[in-house]
Every structure is written in C-alpha cells, then in structure tokens.
Amino acid sequence: MAIRKSNKLPQTAALKQIIKRCSSLGKKQGYDQEGLPEDVPKGHFAVYVGENRSRYIVPISWLDHPEFQSLLQRAAEEFGFKHDMGLTIPCEEVVFQSLTATIR
C-alpha cells in the first residue's frame, strides 16, 4: 500500500502568500493601521473578479473549498504574487457568482 503525500502544504503556503500580499497592499486612505481595508469585516477578504474588476467580499472560510482554491491557484498562475492589482480572480463575473452561490 503506497502512502500518498498530501498537497495541502503547498496549497496552504500559496494561499497564505496570497492573503499576505492582499493585506500588505495599502497604507493609504480607506485602510487601517495594519494595511487592511476598513470596509472589509473581520474574517473576510476582498477579491476582484472579471474584466471590470468588480469587488467582492468573501469569508476566509471559503479558502477551505476546493473550487475556490482552484480559482486562487489560477490567479497565482496568471498574475503571480508581485503586482499591485489586489487579489484578482481570472474568471467571468457570472461564473464567480455561480460558484459563490454553490459555496454558500
């Protein structure tokens, strides 16, 4: 019987890097002392979706959902971690809304 290695650590590290990048984006108006957006409730984070970069506030608990992790992985592959665009999800808004409806 073969022991299967978990992919959880690399995904977790990537997700932590994404969240760290998002929280370090600003020390500007509308951000608190820690660089977090003032209008984002505790336990949530902002993502930007679609061509128009519409802003959505999502709960951190969604990071555990495989479908959402897949979107974040695509974002990391497409945009990397070194940019000033905020956490941008590379999919159409309609697709994102459909996914979020199934996660809720």
Image: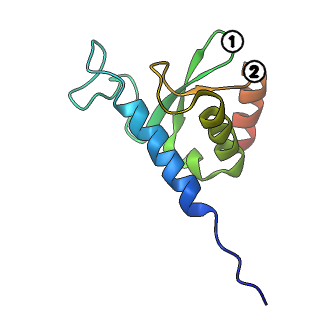
Quadrant of the image occupied by residue 67:
top right
Label 2 element class: loop
Q: Is residue 104 visible?
A: no
Q: Neighbour class for label 2 at 10 Å: few (<14), some, many (≥20)? A: few
Disc 2 target residue: 92
| Side of 38 where 67 appears, left or right | right
Q: Neighbour class for label 1 at 10 Å: few (<14), some, many (≥20)? A: few
Q: Quadrant of the N terminus?
A: bottom right
In percent of width and height, residue 104 lies at 67, 42
Vertical placement of residue 13 versus 46, above or below: below
| Side of 84 where 64 appears, left or right | right
In percent of width and height, residue 59 lies at 52, 40
Name the kind of residue labelled 1 in the image: Glu
Q: Is residue 75 visible?
A: yes
Pick the front one: 36 or 90: 90
Residue reaching furthest to the top: 52
In three-dimensional space, the C-alpha distance between marks 2 and 1, rounded to whole angstroms, equals 7 Å
| Side of 78 where 22 appears, left or right | left
Contact, CB < 8 Å: mark 2 with mark 1? yes
Of the numbered discs 2 and 1, the one sitting upstream in the chain is 1
Residue at left offset 64%, top offset 63%: 7
Q: Residue 51: which disc?
A: 1
In percent of width and height, residue 33 lies at 20, 28
Residue at left offset 64%, top offset 9%: 52
